[in-house]
Amino acid sequence: PQPQPTVPQPQSTITQPQSTVPEERATSHRAVDLGLSVRWAAYNVGANTPLETGDYFAWGETEPKNSYTQSNYSMSQFKDAAAAQWEGDWRIPTIAEWKELQEHCTWKWGQLDGVYGYKITSNRNGNSIFLPAAGYKEGYTISDRNQSGCYWLELVHPSDANYARSLYFDANKEVLIVNRLCFTGRCIRAVCP
């Protein structure tokens, strides 16, 4: 039998994300003001709480599916899954918005109610969100759950349309913008004005 991967031990248990301002809503989904150029959703597209993974999407597709393969990938023109799934002004974040989140917030890896991920706290106003380490889905298999997270960005790779940009993070404190195959299932954390 193959050895099972070990789940990284958290640096510490982290506390629930907080907002010191009244809860803001953009239609029916909670938006958190981190003092940045956009507000960030409190949870992933397809989730109902910050601890839930939510749905996985192939890049540019607007519906989740059971299996993510090259042969069932149907994107011919980019469509924004956040905008399609949620009403209002929600959309997939840009590279600049993810970089702003990295540069102006403190990222703390840990465990919250049994879910590993990053608590991201604004250095500007102290409000925070939690990004679960949801892994990714290829074929029918979810890989790296509770070990890493990979969230789609709105940009396809400039020289290879088989790849799109995404934010990648893991327990080793790596937070990077990377290229991932478009047909694979990744989570989306939406933003709104």
Image (cartoon, helix red, strand yellow):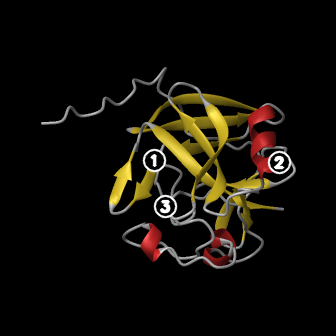
Q: Which residue extends farthest top?
A: 11
Image quadrant holding the C terminus, namely bottom right
Rendered residue at 72%/65% (across/down): 25
Rendered residue at 39%/23% (across/down): 9
Please state the horizontal and vertical placement of residue 90, each as a whole percent of the image.
73, 68
Q: Amino acid at mark 1?
A: Gly
Residue 162 vs 166, above or below: the answer is below
Q: Which mark is residue 185?
A: 3
Towards the viewer: 29 or 59? 59
Residue placed under numbered mark 2 in the picture: 96
User: Number of labelled discs?
Assistant: 3
> Disc 2 versus disc 1: distance between alpha carbons?
22 Å
Please state the horizontal and vertical placement of residue 14, each as a whole percent of the image.
52, 30
Q: Amino acid at mark 2?
A: Ala
Residue 138 vs 61, above or below: the answer is above
Specify whether 36 is left or right of 191: right
Q: Confirm whether residue 23 shows in the render.
A: no
> Disc 2 versus disc 3: distance between alpha carbons?
22 Å
Please state the horizontal and vertical placement of residue 189, each as a whole percent of the image.
63, 56
Residue placed under numbered mark 1 in the picture: 135
Are the two marked residues, 2 and 3, in contact with CB atoms closer than 8 angstroms? no
Image quadrant holding the N terminus, namely top left
Occupied quadrant, residue 188: bottom right
> Disc 3 versus disc 1: distance between alpha carbons?
9 Å
Are the two marked residues, 2 and 1, in contact with CB atoms closer than 8 angstroms? no
Q: Secondary structure at mark 2?
A: helix
